[in-house]
Amino acid sequence: MYDFAVVGVGPAGARFARRAAEAGHDVIALEKGEIGTPLACSGHVSTDLWEYVPDAAKSDLLQNRVRGARFHVGGPGSRSYPFYKREAVSNVVDRVELDRILAACAREAGADVREGHTVTGIDERSDRVVLEVSLAEATGGGTETIEARMVAGCDGPVSRVRRSLDLPEPEETLHGVLAFDAAPDDGDFVDVHLTAPTFFAWRIPRGEAGVEYGLAAPPSADVTDMFEALTDAYGVETDHFCSGAIPIGPPETVTSDRAFLIGDAAAQTKPFTGGGILYGMTAADAAADRIDPADPSTLADYESAWRETLATEIRLGKLIRACYSLPEPIQRVGLRALSGEIGVHMDRPSSFFSREQFRQLFS
């Protein structure tokens, strides 16, 4: 029997598998397809990412450095309100390669990482969790039963672990789409358009990898039409169209008797951008530090630890997002008043109240 079975080997699952294996636990991590595919989210992340990957991996991952963002109330031709730093505030990385490198780190730590393994059933018992697994033809086909003391659900916004164990759903799920223009662009500003209902559209320069265009909105909105309007306004043709769910708002609990959720499965995401890579890996570290697979009571310690670290940032992030729906005249006044050099960290809304930000705001 394994100590932990990890379902899903994205950033959160790979990070937890690595940390748990480093702590001496027997870990198996299961990915239903090929690690890193299909691409379902952007690779625009804060510079804190480099704390989680080997130093040697940076040259393989880094595509561009971003110094700020231009906010628009309208489309590409509308007035922009820049927010920036003198140094890089964020990086654009190869999102597929990031997953593969993090999974390699988990393997090197001793975790048994398997691709082509789809979890089809989960039976939570008093002393273990039993997983029924379907194997892809490339891995031999057939089915397999895997037992573990605990299961980590790191399987994304539409989590089978969460739904199989009747854990509560995220407060909200957005529909996100993105695609790429191959023309190189090493610009150091992203463009943000407050044109999608309750959220926004974006343009991200990715260096030699081209340009990423995307947007997110509630599922009831015609996201595809809005995306076509965005790319038409920029006058570009895109390919590699991707679509996926973005969970917003963690539920009241992300644990059961012998299971716990991490990352998108737990809606551990930034409400104001939808990004979850850093929040998910932060929660993965909390899980690895707090959970003892032989003691289910430690799941409560994980619940407390990740919320203590992220709850304030998520709550403030919701307030930022509420500004996306303000009337346009108010948005313009606020953007004009606040634009300029900033002292804000892109993953931490609380930094808006930092000494550095106040110094920049009143300079």
Image: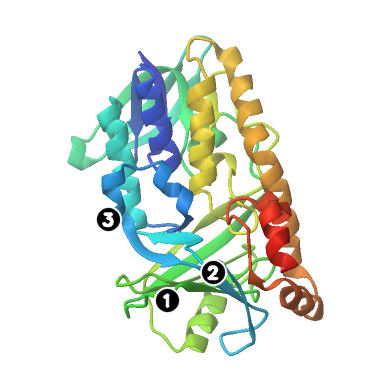
Residue 280 coordinates in the image, percent (x, y):
51, 41
Q: What is the CA distance from the residue labelled 1 to the residue labelled 3? A: 18 Å
Does residue 37 appear in the picture of this structure? no
Does residue 7 appear in the picture of this structure? yes
50 left or right of 244?
left
Q: Secondary structure at mark 2?
A: strand
Residue at point 18% right, 42% down? Answer: 138
Q: Secondary structure at mark 3?
A: helix
Q: In terms of image quadrants, where is residue 39?
A: bottom left
Residue 75 coordinates in the image, percent (x, y):
60, 84
Residue at point 56% right, 61% down? Answer: 175
First-in-chain label (2 vs 3): 3
Dot 1 amino acid type: Gly
First-in-chain label (1 vs 2): 2
Say if 342 sits above or below 349 in the image.
below
Dot 2 amino acid type: Gly
Residue 35 coordinates in the image, percent (x, y):
31, 45
Residue located beneath label 1 in the image: 187
Dot 3 amino acid type: Ser
Q: What is the CA distance from the residue labelled 1 to the residue labelled 2? A: 10 Å
Say if 243 sits above or below 235 in the image.
above
**Structural crowding at the residue carrying mark 2, measured as other residues with C-alpha within 10 Å and reported as few (<14), some (14–19) or many (≥20):** many
Residue at point 38% right, 66% down? Answer: 64
Q: Quadrant of the N terminus?
A: top left
Q: What is the CA distance from the residue labelled 2 to the residue labelled 3? A: 22 Å
**Structural crowding at the residue carrying mark 1, measured as other residues with C-alpha within 10 Å and reported as few (<14), some (14–19) or many (≥20):** some
Can you tell which mark lies on residue 59?
3
Residue at point 35% right, 16% down? Answer: 24
Say if 326 sits above or below 44 in the image.
below
Q: Do the CB atoms of the residues marked 2 and 3 lie less than 8 Å apart?
A: no
Residue located beneath label 2 in the image: 68
237 left or right of 257?
left
